[in-house]
Amino acid sequence: MDEKDSSQKEAASADNSPTDQKEHHADGTQNREKHHGRRLEEYIRHHGQTIEIVSTGVIAAFTVALFLTSYCQWSATRQALRLSRDSLEITQRARLETVSFRPPPLEAGRPLTAGVTYKNVGHVPAEQIQAYRYSEPVRIAVVPRVTRQPVRSDLPILGPDSTREFPVEIRALEPQEVTDLQEGRLFLYVWGCLRYLDGFRQAWRRTAFCAVYRFEPAAKQMAFGDCRQSEEDYADYCPEPPVPSTP
């Protein structure tokens, strides 16, 4: 009896050897993997449409995010280029300024001519320069508001750091008007504006000018000086320019 029990224990011990245990563990692992695989297949089969929709949404969201990133980079580059161009334009474009005035001879009975000298202080030529000008003797020291059309003339291209004078015609004065000018009871105004293309973006620019010829009591002599206050004060005297043609 004891021998039989001993034989059964040895057989059981042989069945539970390390090799058998490893094989049994491997079989269990394979069965679990198969089970999980079947569950995954069933999940995909039942929820495949949902998974496809979610995947499509993720791809769409990524595409939108990529587009927005590219657009922001493009906008930033464009803004930087525009600022660089505007900075270059401010420093390089043509810019006309009036620098001096030549008074007319005070003679009665014949038309007079004053002179306005202007300069291009920019770095490229000013093109298609147009001068609009008025002249009027008045009793009050204020630029007169007139409704008549200005005298216009087209002036040549003016290069950088160059100056030129253009004439301002004045009607013939009566002898009494000349006397009133010399005694400070009359003021002779010449004013208007210059319009020109800036040579950079071919944009129209404007430079206003104003000069008054009057008796200066302190100096006890006639003086012809600048009376401009602001560009906007002379906007009415500068007709809108035509739109420049594009090639």
Image (tube, helix red, strand yellow):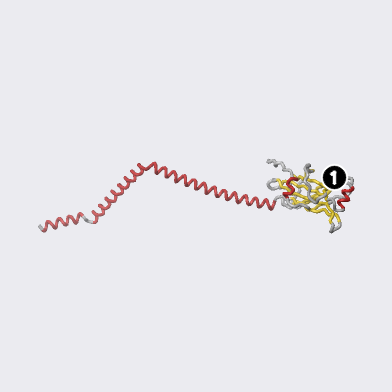
- Please state which of residues 114 and 118 is positioned toward the viewer in this rendering: 114
- Please state which of residues 211 and 38 is positioned toward the viewer in this rendering: 211
Quarter the N terminus occupies? bottom left
Identify the residue shown where x is 20% and y is 54%. Answer: 15
Tell me, yes or no, if residue 79 can be seen here: yes
Residue 152 location, x and y as percent? 78, 43
Residue 239 location, x and y as percent? 74, 43
Question: In screen coordinates, is 176 left or right of 99?
Answer: right
Tell me the crowding category of disc 1: few under 14, some 14 to 19, or many 20 or more residues within 10 angstroms, Cα based.
some
- Please state which of residues 12 and 121 is positioned toward the viewer in this rendering: 121
Question: In screen coordinates, is 26 left or right of 182?
Answer: left
Q: Circle 1 sits in a helix, a strand or a loop, which is it?
A: loop
Q: How many marks?
A: 1
Residue 106 location, x and y as percent? 88, 50
Hey, what amino acid is under mark 1? Answer: Arg
Residue farthest to the left, as pictured: 1
Identify the residue shown where x is 69% and y is 40%. Answer: 245
Task: Kindly identify which residue carries mark 1.
Answer: 171
Residue 138 location, x and y as percent? 82, 48
Name the quadrant containing residue 13.
Answer: bottom left
Quarter the C terminus occupies? top right
Tell me, yes or no, if residue 152 can be seen here: no
